[in-house]
Image (cartoon, rainbow, N blue to C red):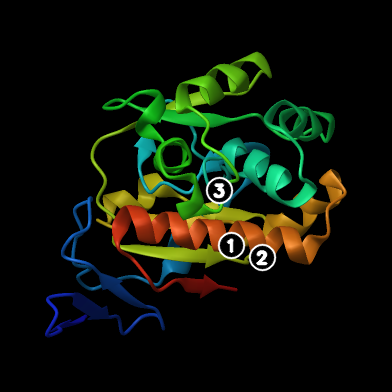
Amino acid sequence: MVKKINKDGSIVFFSFYHTIMTELSPKTSMSTQKIENALPTEQFLMPANPKKFRCVDERQPDEAVINDGIALPGAIYGIVDAIKAIQHVDEPTAWQLASDAGLPMDAHMDEHHHERGCGYGKLVEDEPATVGAVESVPAKTRKVTADEHGGEIITLLGDHAPTEAIINYRPDTTIDTKKALADKRGIFDLDAWALPQLAEKLHIDADQFSSHIIDVYQKTVTRLTGITKFQEVR
C-alpha cells in the first residue's frame, strides 16, 4: 500500500491488490483506516440471500444476525426513493409498489442514533437532494413503515471505519462484513448484479433503474465518508 498526501491535505492510497484509488477527505465525518497487506476484495465475498436486503454500510450487526442480504442504499429505503424518482409517485404508492413486487422490506438502525443510524436514511431526511431523493422523509417514519410491511430491522454495532467502497457485479454474492472487519477492512458495498432483477420485478427500465441506484450509492458514500473512487468487482 502506497500513501500520498496531496497539497490540499487529502490522502490517496494506492493498493497493489486492486485498481481502485480511494481518496479520503481529511474532513470526513467517519474515521478511516489504512489498509496494510490488503487481500483482494473478492476474498470477502459470500453468497447473498435473495430474500433479504441490507444497507451498503460496512458495519456488522449482532453476532446472531447473518448479514447476508442484497446490499442497497438504505436497504428498502433506496428502492422506495428510486421508485418515486423514476415513476413520479408519492411515498405510500412507492412502498406499495415495492410490496406488490414481493421485495424485502428490510432496513436498519444503529446503536448510537437509532432510526437515524442509517446514513442514507439520515441524508434523505436532512439533505435529500444530495442523494437524489425527491423529498425529505423522516428516518423514524420510514422505520415505522418498514415495520408495518413486515421488514426485518437490524441494529448495526460500533463506529464507522470505512476503508473502501465497491460496486459488486459478481452474481449472487455480497460482502461478508464480519470477515472483512476481522481483517480491518471496512467495505461499503453495492450489489449491482441484483439491480436488473429488481427493476424487472418493479416493471421499471433496467438501465434507468441501475444507473439511478449506482449514482445514489456513490453520492451517499462520498457524502458520508469522503471516498470518491469505487472498485468494480466482476
Position of 178 relative to 45 (above/below): above
Classify 10 Å Cα crowding around label 2: few (below 14), some (14-19), many (20 and above): few
Kind of residue sitting beneath label 3: Ala
Kind of residue sitting beneath label 1: Ile
Judge whether residue 147 can be spotted in this image: yes
Kind of residue sitting beneath label 2: Ser
Classify 10 Å Cα crowding around label 1: few (below 14), some (14-19), many (20 and above): some
Position of 95 relative to 149 (above/below): below
- Do labels 1 and 2 touch, CB within 8 Å? yes
Tell me which label, 3 or 1, sits earlier in the chain: 3
* Image side of residue 21 versus residue 33, left or right: right
Label 1 sits on a secondary structure element that is: helix
Tell me which label, 3 or 2, sits earlier in the chain: 3
Q: Position of residue 123 (x, y in %)?
A: 42, 43
| Residue carrying label 1 | 214
| Residue carrying label 2 | 211
Q: Nearer the viewer, residue 79 or 33?
A: 79
Q: Position of residue 43 (x, y in %)?
A: 44, 64
| Residue carrying label 3 | 71
Judge whether residue 171 can be spotted in this image: no
Whole-number angstrom distance, CA of label 3 to CA of label 1? 12 Å
Position of 174 relative to 20 (above/below): above
Q: Position of residue 8 (x, y in %)?
A: 14, 79
Whole-number angstrom distance, CA of label 3 to CA of label 2? 16 Å
* Foreground label between 3 and 1: 1
Whole-number angstrom distance, CA of label 1 to CA of label 2? 5 Å
Q: Position of residue 192 (x, y in %)?
A: 63, 60
Which residue is at a point 46% across and 21% down the rendered structure image?
Answer: 140
Label 2 sits on a secondary structure element that is: helix
